[in-house]
Image (cartoon, rainbow, N blue to C red):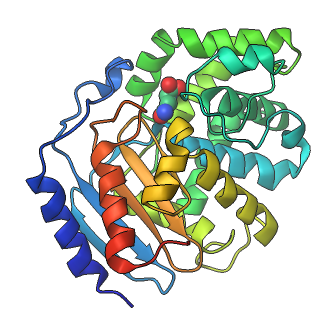
């Protein structure tokens, strides 16, 4: 096994010594005041080992990372039905783009761009009476942390500026791919994006994908086949129009969020979460991508 702790410390020093790149997301007012200097990593191995550096115990807004958990909840409840309403192809467009939706008649390319995650939220609203409460229960069960919660002020501040997401919902409703009230979907989506977790909690939550759909106790949340498909989507679509570059540089399935978090998974080996708020022009954590590139290079552990 590589000396993960020594390698994480080397990565931390390497990232600190570089001039910071990128900008903290400010289009959601509730995220604008996070310090750009925060940096943490937590790596959790299949054998139960934990290795960490920096601000790994501080909670941050997981934002789009939540889309993987929304999809896991939808797939674990209703198997295949969701795939009639959302595709499984890389979009090659930014996370909040509207252009493809018109050409492709209201069917989003994949569940990890905003339009796709909004369809997943609509789908869950059709399955659960109170999906907001049930999603939180689902996340708490997978993470094993009963205190994980929504950040109501971040959710509220996103709802107030959700013009693009509302536009996507209305366009998809016109094509017949949205069934519930737009306001109700936005409320659920913004709450789901506002979940806060630390790197430690995030890497342990995503250990389910590292364990092919099982919790540490052995309990199955997703079948091996469903876990495979979600990991494949993280590989091909987890970083929007930078998914190819992430595969090229890092070589692991993963997902980013505009809160500066990135989580990545090596099935059967480890799950790792990094947090650094400044984002590159594609909306992914600049130092987070670099840290994970160094991790897979220095440990020789990419899936490729
Ligand atoms: N809540 C954010 C939004 O809808 C999530 C985007 C992201 O993290 N890429 O814009």
Where does the image place residue 110, in percent across and percent down from the top left? 71, 38
Q: Is residue 206 above or below residue 72?
A: below
| Number of on-image labels | 0
Farthest residue, direction bottom? 1
Q: Is residue 59 above or below residue 132?
A: below
Where does the image place residue 278, in percent across and percent down from the top left? 27, 36
Front one among 136 and 287: 287
Where does the image place residue 222, in percent across and percent down from the top left? 75, 64
Position of 55 compared to 79: left or right?
left
Front one among 51 and 286: 286
Q: Is residue 194 visible?
A: no
Position of 235 compared to 277: left or right?
right
Q: Is residue 157 visible?
A: yes
Residue 166: quadrant of the picture:
top right
Residue 43: quadrant of the picture:
bottom left
Farthest residue, direction left? 17
Q: Which residue is rendered at x = 40% and y = 59% of the image?
A: 273
The N terminus lies in quadrant: bottom left
Q: Is residue 79 above or below residue 152?
A: below
Q: Which residue is rendered at x = 58% and y = 77% of the image?
A: 216
Q: Which residue is rendered at x = 62% and y = 72% of the image?
A: 215
Front one among 204 and 16: 16
The C terminus lies in quadrant: bottom right
Q: Which residue is rendered at x = 84% and y = 40% of the image?
A: 82
Position of 263 compared to 74: left or right?
left
């Amino acid at each position: 096994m590589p000396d993960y702790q020594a390698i994480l410390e080397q990565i931390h020093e390497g990232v600190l010594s570089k001039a910071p790149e990128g900008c903290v997301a400010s289009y959601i007012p509730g995220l604008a005041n996070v310090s750009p200097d925060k940096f943490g990593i937590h790596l959790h191995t299949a054998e139960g080992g934990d290795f960490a550096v920096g601000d790994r115990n501080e909670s941050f807004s997981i934002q789009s990372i939540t889309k993987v958990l929304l999809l896991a909840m939808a797939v674990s409840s209703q198997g295949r039905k969701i795939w009639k309403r959302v595709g499984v192809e890389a979009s090659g467009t930014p996370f909040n783009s509207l252009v493809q939706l018109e050409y492709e008649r209201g069917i989003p390319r994949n569940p990890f761009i905003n339009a796709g995650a909004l369809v997943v939220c609509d789908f869950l609203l059709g399955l659960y009476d109170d999906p907001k409460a049930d999603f939180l229960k689902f996340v708490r069960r997978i993470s094993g942390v009963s205190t994980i919660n929504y950040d109501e002020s971040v959710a509220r501040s996103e709802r107030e500026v959700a013009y693009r997401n509302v536009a996507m919902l209305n366009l998809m409703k016109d094509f017949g791919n949205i069934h519930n009230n737009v306001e109700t979907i936005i409320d659920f989506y913004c709450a789901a994006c506002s979940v806060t977790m630390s790197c430690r909690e995030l890497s342990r939550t995503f250990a389910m994908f590292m364990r092919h759909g099982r919790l540490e106790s052995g309990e199955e949340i997703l079948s091996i086949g469903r876990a495979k498909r979600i990991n494949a989507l993280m590989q091909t679509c987890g970083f929007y129009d930078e998914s190819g570059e992430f595969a090229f540089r890092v070589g692991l399935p993963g997902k980013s969020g505009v809160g500066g978090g990135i989580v990545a998974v090596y099935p059967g080996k480890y799950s790792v979460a990094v947090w650094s708020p400044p984002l590159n022009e594609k909306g992914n954590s600049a130092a987070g991508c670099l840290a994970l590139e160094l991790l897979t290079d220095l440990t020789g552990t990419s899936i490729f």
